[in-house]
Image (cartoon, rainbow, N blue to C red):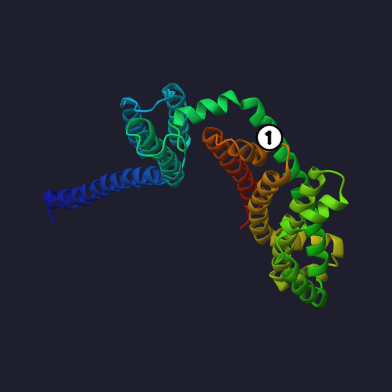
């Protein structure tokens, strides 16, 4: 073979190897870029996506509704309505900016948008076009101004109502958990308890008010009794169901490890039953507020139910609507706190 041919043979593999190295380098750069893109959260949102939400659109609609001239005999108190609407929009915007997941942002944006849409429709149907009777349906600004004017009385009513609910709810929950865990852990006692609880839970707790008034010294004590019963049966039923649904393999493992009965109930059975227990707690909380408001409207002298009932006797629909809004906001906030607690205690699900 000639010297030129040998050189060509030697150069060809070298050139081919250089091409392979270039391709490998390009492939590694593409792989790093793909890995970097994959490391970014899929739910990452741009600033435009975070701010251009239904909340912002409905806030503009709400501002437009406030610009219509008023056709009511009373001052529509536009600054109060504007303050509430702006607060709702700020909550939605701040939540959208802080949200890490698209689903969280969408949920918050939808909720705040619905609130702003309701406020805009309320303003248009009352102050702007006077479609609804002015006496029964005052403009939103008038209602919000009344809430500010009565904030001391409303605060006292909220404190009284929450105190009664807290006492009855916590006491009922404690008793229900103890009874549910102890009676539900045994197969025979669990079946008998379920039948008895099914009968007792069918009786509306409010029918015990006459006995509570006759036997207990104050209306507050009677109300605590009603809330206690309203909490006891749903939570007890949920606890019994949760205990019966505990995986038998987990219990067998606890027995093999010689875990004591008390520790088994508190460390094994109770955590496993928590999801169903929280379902009962949510039902009991809503039922407690319903019964308490009804009791306060019947025979109370303080509380949000009494606030609504007292002014309904005078036909003061502005304060009636103010009380309804405050009750709804308070119950929603407490339910949100309970849901947050549930999420924290059942993160293992």
* Quadrant housing residue 280: bottom right
Is 4 in front, or is 33? 33
* Quadrant housing residue 199: bottom right
User: Percent x, y for residue 242?
Assistant: 70, 65
Is 131 in front, or is 273? 131
Residue 140 shown left or right of residue 9 in the figure: right
Residue 169 shown left or right of residue 10 in the figure: right
Q: Quadrant of the N terminus?
A: bottom left
Is 187 in front, or is 84? 84
User: Percent x, y for residue 207?
Assistant: 74, 59
Q: Residue at x 64, y 31 (%)?
A: 154
The secondary element bearing badge 1 is classed as helix
Residue 181 shown left or right of residue 88 in the figure: right
Is 111 in front, or is 263? 111
Circle count: 1
Q: Is residue 50 visible?
A: no
Q: Quadrant of the C terminus?
A: bottom right
Can you say whether 313 is above or below 289 in the image?
above
Q: Residue at x 42, y 34 (%)?
A: 134
User: Percent x, y for residue 6?
Assistant: 17, 52
Mark 1 neighbour class, 10 Å CA radius: few under 14, some 14 to 19, many 20 or more: many
Q: Is residue 131 visible?
A: yes
Q: Residue at x 26, y 44 (%)?
A: 22
Residue 106 shown left or right of residue 268 in the figure: left
Q: Residue at x 41, y 24 (%)?
A: 78
Can you say whether 6 is above or below 194 in the image?
above
Q: Which residue is mark 1?
A: 157
User: Percent x, y for residue 213?
Assistant: 82, 50
């Amino acid at each position: 073979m000639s010297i030129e041919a040998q050189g060509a043979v030697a150069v060809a593999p070298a050139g081919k190897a250089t091409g392979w190295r270039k391709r490998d380098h390009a492939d590694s750069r593409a792989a790093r870029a793909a890995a970097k893109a994959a490391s970014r959260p899929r739910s990452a949102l741009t600033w435009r996506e975070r701010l251009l939400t239904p909340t912002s659109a409905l806030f503009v609609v709400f501002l437009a509704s406030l610009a219509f001239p008023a056709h009511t005999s009373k001052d529509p108190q536009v600054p109060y309505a504007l303050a509430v609407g702006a607060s709702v929009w700020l909550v939605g915007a701040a939540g959208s900016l802080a949200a890490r997941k698209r689903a969280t942002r969408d949920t918050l944006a939808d909720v705040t948008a619905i609130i702003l849409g309701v406020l805009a429709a309320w303003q248009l149907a009352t102050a702007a076009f006077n479609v609804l009777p002015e006496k029964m349906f005052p403009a939103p600004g008038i209602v919000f101004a009344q809430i500010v004017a009565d904030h001391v009385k409303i605060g006292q009513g909220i404190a009284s109502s929450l105190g009664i609910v807290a006492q009855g709810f916590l006491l009922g929950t404690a008793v229900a958990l103890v009874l549910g865990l102890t009676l539900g852990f045994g197969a025979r006692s669990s079946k008998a308890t379920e039948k008895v609880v099914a009968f007792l839970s069918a009786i509306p707790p409010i029918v015990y008010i006459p006995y509570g008034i006759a036997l207990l010294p104050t209306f507050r004590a009677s109300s605590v009794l009603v809330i206690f019963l309203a909490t006891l049966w749903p939570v007890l039923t949920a606890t019994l169901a949760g205990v019966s649904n505990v995986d038998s393999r987990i219990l067998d493992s606890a027995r093999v490890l010689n875990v004591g009965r008390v520790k088994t109930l508190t460390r094994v059975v109770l955590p496993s039953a928590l999801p169903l227990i929280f379902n009962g707690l949510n039902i009991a909380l809503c039922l407690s507020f319903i019964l308490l408001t009804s009791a306060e409207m019947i025979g109370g002298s303080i509380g949000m139910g009494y606030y609504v009932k007292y002014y309904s006797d005078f036909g003061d629909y502005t304060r009636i609507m103010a009380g309804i809004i405050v009750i709804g906001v308070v119950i929603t906030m407490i339910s949100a706190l309970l849901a947050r607690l549930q999420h924290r205690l059942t993160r293992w699900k």
